[in-house]
């Protein structure tokens, strides 16, 4: 309960976003390859931002 209103750090937000993009890319890989590649590219850009924070 004490962590209920605690804000997420920038690093945690980016990690969540990265994981979500990879999940979307995986689900799109069977139906729309172009959109899947776009999601993977976006995930790579977020990974670059994470590396800058570290």
Image: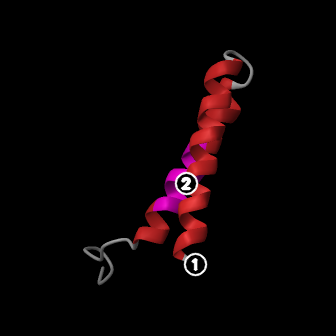
Tell me where residue 45 appears, x and y as whole percent.
Answer: 57, 50
Most common SS among magenta residues: helix
Identified at 66% across, 16% down, the residue is 32
Cβ atoms at labels 2 and 1 below 8 Å apart: no
Q: Nearer the viewer, residue 50 or 25?
A: 50
19 relative to 2, above or below: above
Against 40, residue 29 (above or below) is above
Q: Which residues are magenta?
A: 14-21
Q: How is the image coloured?
A: secondary structure
The circle drawn on residue 46 is: 2
Residue 24 placement (x, y as % from top left)? 60, 35
Q: In terms of image quadrants, where is residue 54? A: bottom right
Figure disc tally: 2
**Residue 28 image point, x, y percent:** 65, 25
Q: Residues within 10 Å of mark 2 (few under 14, many from 20)?
A: some
State left or right for residue 43 relative to residue 16: right
In the picture of the structure, the residue carrying the numbered disc 1 is: 54
Q: Secondary structure at mark 1?
A: loop
């Amino acid at each position: 309960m004490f962590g209920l209103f605690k804000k997420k750090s920038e690093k945690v937000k980016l990690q969540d976003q990265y994981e979500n993009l990879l999940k979307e890319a995986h689900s799109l890989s069977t139906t729309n390859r172009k959109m899947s590649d776009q999601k993977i590219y976006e995930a790579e850009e977020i990974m670059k931002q994470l590396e800058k924070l570290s």
